[in-house]
Image (cartoon, rainbow, N blue to C red):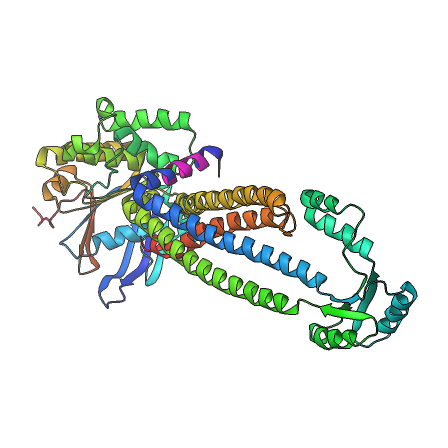
Amino acid sequence: MISLRNVSKAYPTGVSALRNIELEIGKGEFTFLVGPSGAGKTTLLRLLFREEVPTSGSVIVNGHDVGRMRRQQIPYLRRQIGVVFQDFRLLPQRNVAENIAFALRVIEVHPREIRRRVGQVLELVGLTDRATALPAQLSGGEQQRVALARAMVGRPVILLADEPTGNLDPQNAQDMMKILLEINRLGTTVVMATHAAHLVDRARQRVVAMEDGAIQRDALAAAYHEEVSR
Amino acid sequence: MRLRTWAFCLSEASQNLLRNPVLAIASITTTAVSLLVLGVFLLLSVNVNSIATSIESQVAVRAFFAHQTAESQELAELQTVRGWQGVRSASLVTKDQALSQLKKEFGKQGQVLETLGTANPLEDSLSVTAQKPADVKPLAVRLSHLAGIVHTTYQSSVVSRLFALINGVRVVGLAIGVLLLIGSLLVITNAIRLGIAARRREIGIMRLVGATEALVHWPFILEGLILGGIGAVVASGLSFWSYVAVYHDAVHSLPFLPLVSPSPIPRDIALLLLLLGILLGAIGFRISVRRLARI
């Protein structure tokens, strides 16, 4: 589903964000990207939805060679990928249902289909009764669930989450994690960059640890920190 | 794009306009004013041109015969003049023809001439046009030396002054019009840029969820077209209908003034203003689009 071969990324400023990354993520996997700030987690995610292009190496996402893709093809790649950020990025003047529907309106989905799918994702994130509330009337946890619903309403095959629990209290972070695991269980490949050690430790999923733009550790059913053999 | 997608783009564009009504009104007003000024100068120029052409065609040297000159002598002189170099045409205007021409030029007010009854105070004359304006003066001198000619007249100085006036009107009108157009272009561009700034987050989300660039751009293109278009409709309508009103008034009160009829040229000028306004909106978008690419 996702394949990075010898990928490096350097910015014009000379900062080397990624160095010789080799990474394979299979269909339906759940992968944590962990590591300190500046390790390259966000850059790696941005390569996957073609917000950045690699300086060298190849990035293949769901069969698309992202680095060599023509500009006009980018929207079609992004329709297969859902993205959630730490800062939610909701439209403040639109209510919950409109925020979610917006993602489908701009890719020209039929209004009847939009209504149906918005209802489904609201149920998935548990916000059916908040459909007409404005973002400002919601808690942080609820806002992030709206952002997640918007990312999922296009039925992406891949969900990328960049510190999705970074702005949430422990309880809301826990709830968000549950929903992400449920989404993965339903078949979506999930890649989540996070600092939240307790969530990673509890989920027991694949962990890719990064430092200084390189992968330090890649382990299945692992914890946030490397575990010494017991 | 589908119809409902156009509706989406249109609603986004109008939301931008409503978010900043003062700027929208400023854009529309400056566009309307600049196009109106341009239109008025174009109409003025077209009409001054028409008046000058009409006068130019009338610039003939008129050589008047003394009262009761024999017709045979007049015809003989006509033949002589026709043989001169630099003469484009020459004709004999009898006093009866001159009177009926006068009546025609007076239009409805020609009735005053009825008071003359059968008397005709006019003289027979030769009407001679020159090949080049420069030939007019020597021609007049030469005609005055002909036997039987009492006096000669011509109006070349009027024409040269008129042409100078037309050129002046054209240059001033174009300069003012172009300056105003640049001004309104800046205002439109600014309005679109503010719209882009206000919608940064929305544009970012649109791209994130896979909206095509066309869909990202169209609301702003429409915004430019609406701003330029409304201004142009106002300017084009105002200039055309007020011209029609002035024209119909002038036809009755100043029948001898050869104003250009509202169709086709003033109508084409109105259409030109409309196109210019829409173009202004499109260029305004084109200038702002780099802002859009940076989001």
A23 left or right, relative to B253: left
Pinpoint residue A128: horizontal percent, then vertical percent. Answer: 24, 23
Position in image of residue B98 (x %, y %): 78, 55
- Of residues B8 and A102, the one drawn nearer to the viewer in this rendering: B8
Question: Looking at the magenta stretch, what is its main secondary structure?
Answer: helix
Q: Does A94 appear in magenta?
A: no
Q: Is residue A49 visible?
A: no
Residue B7 is inside the magenta segment? yes
Residue found at the far right of this picture = B72
The residue lying at 40 percent from left, 44 percent from top is B223
Residue A62: x %, y % from top left: 38, 46
Left or right, A133 with reference to B27: left
In the displayed structure, B156 sits above or below B294; it is below
Q: Is A210 or B220 nearer to us in this picture?
A: B220
The x and y percentages for residue B108 are 68, 42
Q: Residue at x 24, y 67 (%)?
A: A13
